[in-house]
Image (cartoon, rainbow, N blue to C red):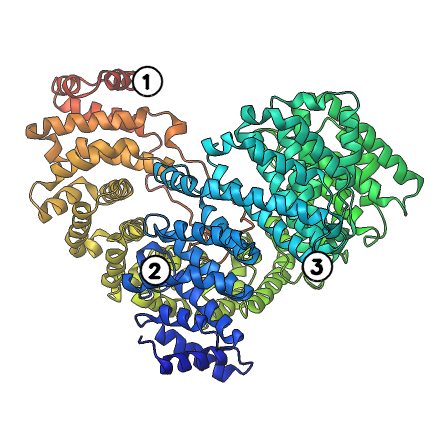
Amino acid sequence: MEWNQETLQHLSQCFLHTLSPSPEPRRAAERSLAEMADRPNYGLAVLRLVAEQTIDEQIRHAAAVNFKNHLRFRWAPASDRNSGPTLAPILDAEKDQIKSLIVGLMLTSTPRIQSQLSEALVVVGNHDFPKHWPTLLPELIANLKDAAQSNNYVSINGILGTANSIFKKFRYQFKTNDLLLDLKYCLDNFAAPLLEIFLKTAALIDSTVSSGGPVATLKLLFESQRLCCRIFYSLNFQELPEFFEDHMREWMTEFKKYLTTNYPALESTSDGLGLVDGLRAAVCENISLYMKMNEEEFQGYLNDFALAVWTLLGNVSQSSSRDSLAVTAIKFLTNVSTSVHHTLFAGEGVIPQICQNIVIPNVRLRDEDEELFEMNYVEFIRRDMEGSDVDTRRRIACELLKGIATHYRQHVMETVSVQIQNLLTSFAANPVANWKDKDCAIYLVVSLATKKAGSTSISTDLVDVQSFFTSVIVPELQSPDVNAFPMLKAGALKFFTMFRIQIPKIHAFQFFPDLVRFLGAESNVVHSYAASCIEKLLQVKDEGGKSRYNSADITPYLSVLMTSLFNAFKFPESEENQYIMKCIMRVLGVTEISNEVAAPCISGLTSILNEVCKNPKSPIFNHYLFESVAVLVRRACQRDPSLISAFEASILPSLQIILQNDVTEFLPYAFQLLAQLIELNRPPLSSNYMQIFNLLLSPDSWKRSSNVPALVRLLQAFLQKVPREIAQEGKLREVLGIFNMLVLSPSTDEQGFYVLNTIVESLEYGVIAQFVPHIWGVLFTRLQNKRTVKFVKSLLIFMSLFLVKHGPENLVNTMNAVQSGIILVILEQIWIPNLKLITGAIEWKLTAVASTRLICESPVLLDAAAVRHWGKMLDSIVTLLSRPEEERVEEEPEMPDITENMGYTTAFVNLYNAGKKEEDPLKDIKDPKEFLVASLARISAVSPGRYPQIISENLEPANQSALLQLCSAFNCPIV
């Protein structure tokens, strides 16, 4: 794109129109800019527009935003990115010009534009700095020195902000040689200028404060120090650099000053206080880092900082604006408490003071907590129940107690127990006025509970769980008004949920009706916690893995429970409440579903499904919605097959909406549910299903990778249910075309084998015989071009399945028909060395039996010319059969929890309750070990004396002993 006056005017008009409130000119401008973005030098032209002072700032700001986004998507080569369409990358010559202009332009721009250009610079820096942009750091340092000479703190802060963003990579990337080389380059060039500007700014702060200088100047100076502290954190994150160790006193002296000095001129206003607190929080992060990483070098400063932070915390108000400072300060004390310097907490009265002055004030509910509880229940639950990565004051204060308890557990427990009793006494004296004291007591018990390693069970030394539950929690559960003191009700429900394993069934289940009652509470948090408590109770397992609560327990309450759950969706903000939907799924998975319950449930679920199809926005809720439909279909129809047609009448219209409207997020779910319905049906299938089968054969259906596993699952269902129809209508060739497409790609080859295995299992040999040479040709080509462990294991399983279904002779002859003698090559290179890798109970049995049949029934293997192959194959079979069960048997997966950060991604999400039931193709063979020795005894009886010598020459000594033991165990000698 040529830069001239015409280009300037056209770009200016386009960016002006992007700000238009009218959609037509805005969309036209966006299309025009998108078209121009593919041209060379577009980014450079936009940057030059940003530099034009004669253009309105709004237009230049819009251009700066566009420039930043242009670099974000086009600076790196397309291969560096994993998503989105491939865009034309910026050419190297244009990149060089952009890099030569951007720093100077950023520093001379207004704050709004400077912010955008700084982000754009960081985008470039993340890819090119320092190797491909060696001039950046020297240019930043030169500009920093120039700005420092004139005390231009607007420019200084722009430079420091940019450096801070560029250096952040040292915090988050793994330590590698390349990263350490980059870090050394930055330290060698920037460590000294950083200290210089830090000390200069510190002196300016002192002189400005003492002279009563302008507050506006102080604000710039404090922001500069905060940025210096954040750069300090990045440059020190990997290890303690020599320069910083040499100059530790200068840094620590200033750090301590900011923690112990008040700045009334700034702290009298909220934004000024925020700047001071931001600097103090950055200091606390730095000293926490040194406490963890450089404890020995830092210990000389530790006592002073511990006292400074302790004193500071005593003066930090409960305002949410000061949360960041409070959290980072408490984290520092927590780090000290778990270190070798924990004796700082051993003094008399220290732990009670911490509990009284730091912990209790920060655990007690604040107005902000109540507001979050009422206005944003999802975020409240995320922080309170699920332990999000947001550090709240409540949680971090309890973490401090846990830290101190590492070395002083008994003292901490005794102190907190006294505090809990005081809080409960205060509540008892005036329950209406002091309800927050009871909430605080419950929170302390729950938060300080400890979880046993590898278990869901938690315990506490603070109180007797049963006694606390009876005296403190039960009164809240039995409160007749579910809407009174909702935060207290939520705390009681949380306790019940957390200690559900410790509370015996005889005590816990008598309050089940109360849990159902709380589903009708107006508070979103309360009815969510009630649903979560029910759901978690139904997951409790006693010793031996037996569920504590079963269908018989739930059945008396089932009707009112399901009604209450579906009614809870009617509360404002709970229309897509994931906790309620998860509870519905869990209840349907446990209880016996009568026709009276099934009908309203499927009606309610499909009604919700039709609504969310219009705008899918809650991935977790929607996943549990589909799981609920799947478990209802599976359990109700297995109990009463006559329900299938009624369920189809409800579900199929919803699934057709998803298919017709191409609701991308729901397509994998729809295909899995269709597969489930087909498997429950009896052939012949209705025309509706066969229309879907024809859609399945279209190559366009397979273009989205996220759909592939679900489409394969659906294709398998058709192959199993109507194999004859597929063969008679000549569709098998198209199905094999899908297999061909899938198996040639390493990302989908396993899915291709699923299709192939189902074809072999479901269709007679006479139907597939004409296609078998083609199948082997495809597999051998892929094996030759790209051999992976996953592919080899899948191939081995397929060959075994083919053998047990259609016999060793067909396997050997069809393979050798592709290439003479290839069976022995496959045995030597693939089958024998990889048989030991097979896992999974069905797969283990299948491959062992198939391998046994091959060496005991195939003339090729029984021939004298194949003695070595026979022996090595037997050695491999014995190795497979000798493996301990825990190594070869894969655990049955349980219903997984869907993570909070789950979103609609390109990844496939499996429906657990619509999963394909794996069938054993060898039901008649109970033990593959017995099958092996019986088969060997049979052929050795035909050729006495032949096989002992082959065994002694080809089997490892350990396998010879193992085989001898098997023969003895089953009384089948090899003669």
> In terms of sequence position, does the residue under pointer 3 or pointer 2 come before the other?
3
Q: What residue type is labelled 3?
A: Ala
Do residues under tags 1 and 2 come within 8 Å of each other at their CB atoms?
no
Q: Nearer the viewer, residue 323 or 528?
A: 323
Q: In 3D space, how far apart are the residues under numbered discs 3 and 1 (Cα atoms)?
A: 62 Å
Q: In 3D space, how far apart are the residues under numbered discs 1 and 2 (Cα atoms)?
A: 44 Å
Residue 311 in picture, x, y percent from top left: 75, 35
Residue 962 in picture, x, y percent from top left: 28, 18
**Residue linked to disc 3:** 568
At label 1, counting other C-alpha atoms closer than 10 Å, the crowd grade (few under 14, some 14-19, many 20 or more) is: few
**Residue linked to disc 2:** 722
Q: In 3D space, how far apart are the residues under numbered discs 3 and 2 (Cα atoms)?
A: 42 Å
> In terms of sequence position, does the residue under pointer 3 or pointer 1 come before the other?
3
Mark 2 falls on what kind of element?
Answer: loop
Is residue 403 visible in the rendered image? The answer is: yes
Q: Which of 2 and 718 is in front in this view?
A: 2
**In the rendering, which numbered label is found on residue 969?**
1
Q: In which quarter of the image is the C terminus?
A: top left
